[in-house]
Structure formats: C-alpha cells, structure tokens
Amino acid sequence: MSFCQKTIRFLFYALFILVPLIFLPNTSELFEFNKIILTYIFVVLISTCWICDCIIQKKFIFRRTPLDIPLLVFLGFSILSLVFSIDVHTSIYGYYSRWNGGLLSLFSYSLLYWAFVTHFDSKSSLNAIRYTLYAAIPVALWAVAEHFGIDSKMWVQDVQNRVFSTIGQPNWLAAYIVSLIYLPLSGLLKFQTPNPKSQINPKLLSFKHLDFRNYLDLRILNLVFFVLLFSVLLFTKSRSGLLAFGISSLVFWIMSFNKKTVIPMIIFTLSTLSFLLVFKNPIRDLVFKSTVVEKTVGTVLESGGTESGTIRKIVWTGATRIWTSSIKNLLIGTGPETFAMAYYQYRPIEHNQTSEWELLYNKAHNEFLNQLATTGVLGFISYLSLLFFMSIIFLKSQILNSNNQINSKNKIQNNLDLRILSLGLFCGWLTISVTNFWGFSVVITQILLFLLPAMAISLERESGRAGEYKSTNLSGLQKIGLFVSCSSTLLLFYSIGKYWYADVKLASSQLQTRYFGSTQNPQYLIAAYNEITQSFKLNSHEPNITSEYAMSAAYLAAALKPQNATQAAQLAQQALNISDLTIEASPHHPNFFKSRSRMAILLSEVDPRYLDIAAQSLQQASLISPTDPRIPYNQGLIAKYQNKISDAKAFFQKALDFKPDFQDAIQQLHP
C-alpha cells in the first residue's frame, strides 16, 4: 500500500472524529460553519493524496460502485438547477448560517464517498466504524454533563432542558446519535448466534488497542455504549429523533429475527420502554398528558412544542406553492439552498398568526419538500433515486450474507457478523431520512448519509486488495504533475482560510456593534467598522458581509455627522455603494432590502433624501415578501416621517390586514 493510500485512510479517521467535535466561539455561527470548513479541508487533503497517488502509479485509481450513476445524476440535476437559480452565490456556497446543501458541499460529500470506496477494504472499514463510534463517546458524555448543568451559563438556551453538546441543536444531536446507536446494538446481537468456524476478531466493535476480556465482557461494553447514546437521545427531547429510533428499531428486529434473538428483543423493548417512562421526553409527556410548559431551545418549530405541527404545515404549504408556481420551478426549482428567498414570495398569510411570524425560515423543515421546492421534480426524483440505490446496497448485503455468498477467504468476519454489522449501518442510515423528513440535514448527518453506504460496500471487499502499490522512479512529467497538485492544494487552503477568517471578522464586527448598542460608546462603532472592512477585503462577494459593511458605515456616518459632516457624507456614499453590491449579489432576499432600508434611515440623519431610498427598498421588499406585515408597517413609519399621513395610514392598515393583532400598527393607526 502506498503512502498516499495510508494517508487517505488516516484522514478519513480524523474526519469522523474531528467534525462532530469541532465548534469555535469566534465565528458568526459556532457549529455548522466550522464543521463545513473542516470538511472542506479534509476533502482537499484527501483529493490531493488521491491525485498524487494516481500520478505516481501512472493510472487512474477508481473503484466502480452501483451508486456512481445515481450520484452523478443527482449532481447533474443540482448543477442544472444552479444554472437557473434565483441566487447563484447561495446555490454554490449554501445559505449563510447553514452552508450544508450548497453545490460545493454536495460535490464534497460525493468526493468523500468515491474516495472511501476506492481506498477502503473490510479491515480498514471496520477501523472507520470504530473511529466513528469513538467520536460519539465525548459528544455523548458532554451531552450528559450538559444535562446536569456543566455549561448552562455559557448559553442563552436552556441547555439542561434540551442538550445539544458539540453538534449545536437538540434535533441535530438526536439525528447524529440515532444514526450510530445501532452499531453497539449490532455488537450486542452478534454474540447471540456465534459461528464456530468464524475467524472474527472478538473486539469487532470495542476499543482496538485495549483488551477488556480480562475484566469486562465485551457485551457489557456495547451495552454501556448503547445506554449512553440512548440516554442522550432522551435528553435531547427530540420527537423526530425518537420517531426515527422507533422506526429503525422495528426494522432492525424484524430483519434480525430468529429464535435466538427473541430474548434480546424482549429485553431491548422492556429496557427502552422503562427509560422512556422514567426520563422526561415527548413520549412520556404524551403518555402522562403533561401540561407543564417548559422553556424551549430555538423556535417552537425546532423545539418540538405543541405548535410545531401547525407551523410545519404552513411552511410545507409555502414549499408546495414554490414548486407549483411556474413550469421552471416545477421542473428545476428555484436553485439549491434558495428556500429562504423563495418562501417569502409564496409565504402563506396564516404564518402571521403564529408565534414565529417574524422568524426567517431558510429551510422547509422537511428535506424532501426542500429538495422539491429548490431543485424541482427532476432534482427531487434524482434525490429519491439516490436514496433508493443506497438502500439497495444495504439490502443486497443482507440477502447475500444470509445466503452465504460472501467470499470465504475474508479474514475479518464471517457471513453472520457482516450481516449484523451491515444491518446496524442500514438502520442508522435509515434514521437520517426519517429525521430529515421532520427537519433538515446538517454537515455531520450528511457525511454519514453518504459514507455509511460506502462503509457497507467496503466491508465486503477483501482485505489487502484496496490497491497494490508499485514503486517506480518519477519522470519529469510526473514531478510537474505533483508540483501542480500540491500548489493547487495550497491555493485552495488559502481560499478556505480567507473565507473562514472573513467570517471571524464579521462576527467580531457584529459583537462590537452590539457593545455600542448597550453602551452608546462610539469607539465600538469605529472598531466594528474596522473589523468589517477587513472582512470585506477578504471576502467581498458574500452578501451577508457586504450588508453588514453597509450598516456599519451607516452607523458611523450618523455618529460622525455632528462633528465631521464631510467624513459622514463620504461614509454615507460608501454605505450606499456597498449596499448596491449586496442587492446585486442577492436580489431576491427580503432581509437585504430590509437592511438597506434601515441603513438609509440611519443615513437620513446625514441627508434627509436617503428616506426616499429607504422607502424604495421597502417597496422592493414588499414585492419579494408580499405577506410580511412588518414591511408595510415600516413603510408607514417612513411615510409618517415624510409627513405623508394618508399613505402612512394605508400602510398601517395593510399591516393590520396581514396581522390583525399587530399591536404596533394598531397604536400607529389609533394613537
């Protein structure tokens, strides 16, 4: 095996361990942003090693699998949707604050899949499974500690009530946990039906370098691990996670059923039911009809409150309207990850009667409807086809191994153990689609969605045949190819580093602006402006950065007006020019027009004529988001400032038509 192949395997092990664990406090989004950046770094490193190995061995190293065509079709229709996207930048990079789902991330996950199946065999796949489970241990332990208040003072959210550990949100943590929980369960089940002819390593799902046999039965180790993961699942209080666990558990026991698994199945059922009735969770609350109102984490929709179903129906209705609004949207959608822009064009007016009426929904909270709305029926069918062929991979493994058709020379595990382990992978993979139906994918679950099938494929590959290395002297052309590959890698690292550091500066600027809001100290405005200026120099194409830059310049212009009118006027013009860049880059996002109107209102202290720009910006926002009551309300305020009383009353009445209980509008209309 070549050095490059060994490095690729090591990088995958590091990927499985580090991505779930990483989060940093100095970025605008602590969790998903740093996970996607780290994923991109690993993709670049793995791809570089792969290319270098091909150059050194003078051949294209690639292993064909049944998922190649479905994956290419899925990427092809995503690219087609991107071409006609209403926001190309977002479709490439993903929605800012989410990132996962943009074409760049989908391409990265696909590369990870192909790299894994090409370079892993049964033995190394087992190692990958071990490292994936090892990463879940600190995540789960931190969640348990979180439940008992270890970091309760660090977060605004009631983290003791619903834990999220290093994943970032309770439902995301639940999705991660249930995708792995069947691996220790399959480790328990394999001991029920031993095969005397097996040459299996007894530490299949245990720690690789420690021997527990002298003082701890491996079944107890797997049981402890399962109990730990299941406890964390309960601590998340995620209804989608519990539902996914219930569905996959049913599949697991049906597919593994025989006379020797009856007792384990009964013990499993009684134990999980006991946990469900002892610990607080949505199922226990339903059984005992709990009327206690608990503090929630995030939106009501995300937190699993009683209003969750109502809000989901409204958001899903909007997603359906997006899809059916035109022939173009019907076929190829509005573009990958453009739901936030498209939804507000077709937002049901019923949304205004919910407690979440002012929140921006950048996802449909249903991965399938999200795909349908943003990539159309072509992208939706290709996504379903990809999932279908992935499931066939797992089911084929179950059928082949139950019929004893696996290669008898496999030195890692016998048919039975492979079948049970593949079943654990399948049931974990299945939970991801269930949780996605009630929510949306994030970086770590998307990685597992693509790589759990890759593990199942590689488990059936005979060890020692992942690729035979032939040492040869490098020609001049090969050396040039290696130099170009390594140079390209450095350029990609530089680009990724700039993208990440620009966000760090964006977060710092936002923090300084908040400090100004609480202290009214203009020094914070200067610091915020300097920070966002650096962010803009690093990434001038990101609308979120340019929008923040324009606002920061406007704040500073308004603050300098009494002392230095000339500099204030220059900053005002700069703010307007930067705001133009924002609108040009993202012309369908209502929030950027709202931000532009706030910027213009601030600048009206420098020159009253900027109020006209504020009014024009809100008029554009009303076209993009025609059912948002806050837009006509703000239009009314501007008209009132301009002494256009009749127009102001009309705007306030329109706001009340959208939301009859809008108290601010009522007070303006009837002071």
Image: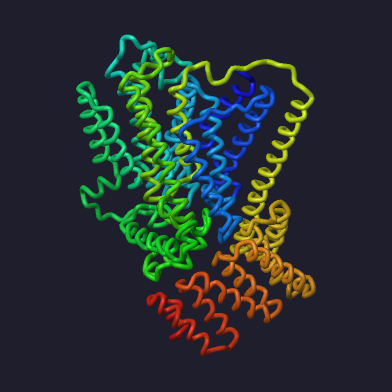
On the image, the x and y values in percent for residue 316 come to 38, 59
Instruction: Decide if residue 521 is in sight here.
Output: no
Residue 44 vs 158, above or below: the answer is above
Pick the front one: 572 or 427: 427
Pick the front one: 301 or 255: 255
Q: Residue at x 33, y 55 (%)?
A: 305
On the image, the x and y values in percent for residue 455 come to 46, 29
Which quadrant of the structure image shows residue 53? top right
Instruction: Specify whether 328 is left or right of 578.
Output: left
Residue 52 vs 563, above or below: the answer is above
Instruction: Specify whether 472 is left or right of 328.
Output: right
Q: Residue furthest bottom?
A: 646
On the image, the x and y values in percent for residue 31 come to 53, 45
Q: Residue at x 36, y 58 (%)?
A: 312
Residue 649 vs 497, above or below: the answer is below
Which quadrant of the structure image shows residue 204? top left
Q: Residue at x 41, y 14 (%)?
A: 201
* The C terminus, quarter of image: bottom left
Pick the front one: 492 or 652: 492
Instruction: Decide if residue 71 is in sight here.
Output: yes
